[in-house]
Image (cartoon, rainbow, N blue to C red):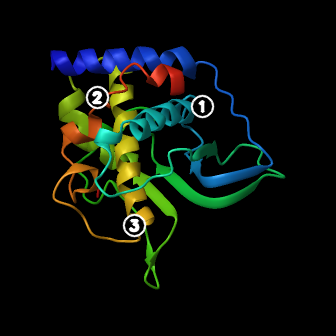
Amino acid sequence: MNSLRSQHRQALEAILLVSCVWTMTLHAQQSGATLVFYAQPQVSDELLPALFQVLRADLDDEAGLPNGVQFDKDATFVRGSDDLLGITFSRIITVKLLGRCDVLPQTSRPSLQGPLGWVMLVSGKIQPRISIDCTRLAQVLRPAVAGLNKQERRYAMLQAIAHVLLHEWSHIATQSPAHTAGGLTRADLSVNELIATPKRNQLSAASHYSR
């Protein structure tokens, strides 16, 4: 647990350096994939900028990505509430975050069932839409984060959201519902896999920062 806390504290300090003020410059034409995020109205405005930094660190950590899955590492992350008028996107993936993804008060609720995230298969094609259930995710994380402070719990939640997102994104990228025997594309991710900090990017997050 001390090692886990140390890793999370280092990564959290890196995130805080850049997530206090978040600006994004969008060009008139966006090439590559664009992930558009939607969160509940009551969720903190700081959630998505911090989540984007965690995702960048994960995408840069090639060793932590599923084997054979090619993600667009230059993908653009935007909020659905951003002013996107006049901007053209070549490929859009929508990401819907369900529940209070910025805090973990829902962990005291009765045990829930169901997936942490999912995509939809329509007419044989996996749709570019990802849903993540943060209430269910918080419940799964509860045993691992019980001894962490508020900021460390918040980082663990962000890392878990990112890993569920990458899991579901892999289904879209490969257009396959299949799972692998290991890595982020396993059918059931362990708690340690959900909250693991990218090995090569615990500090580089400052410069970029399952089922």
Q: Earlier in the sequence, mark 3 or mark 1?
A: 1
Report which quarter residue 63 is drawn in. top left
Residue at image coords 52%, 36%: 52
C-alpha distance separating marks 2 and 1: 28 Å
> Vertical placement of 16 versus 143: above or below?
above
Q: Which residue is mark 2?
A: 199
SS category of the residue bearing label 1 = loop
Residue 154 percent location from the top left of the image: 39, 27
Badge 1 amino acid: Asp
Badge 3 amino acid: Thr
Residue 141 percent location from the top left of the image: 25, 38
> Does residue 132 appear to the left or right of 22 in the view shown?
left
> Vertical placement of 123 versus 22: above or below?
below
Report which quarter residue 124 is drawn in. bottom left
Residue at image coords 35%, 22%: 202
Residue 158 percent location from the top left of the image: 40, 34
Q: Residue furthest bottom?
A: 123
Q: In the rendering, which numbered label is found on residue 89?
A: none
> Vertical placement of 143 versus 18: above or below?
below
Q: Which residue is mark 3?
A: 174
Q: Which residue is mark 1?
A: 45
Residue 54 percent location from the top left of the image: 44, 33
C-alpha distance separating marks 3 and 1: 32 Å
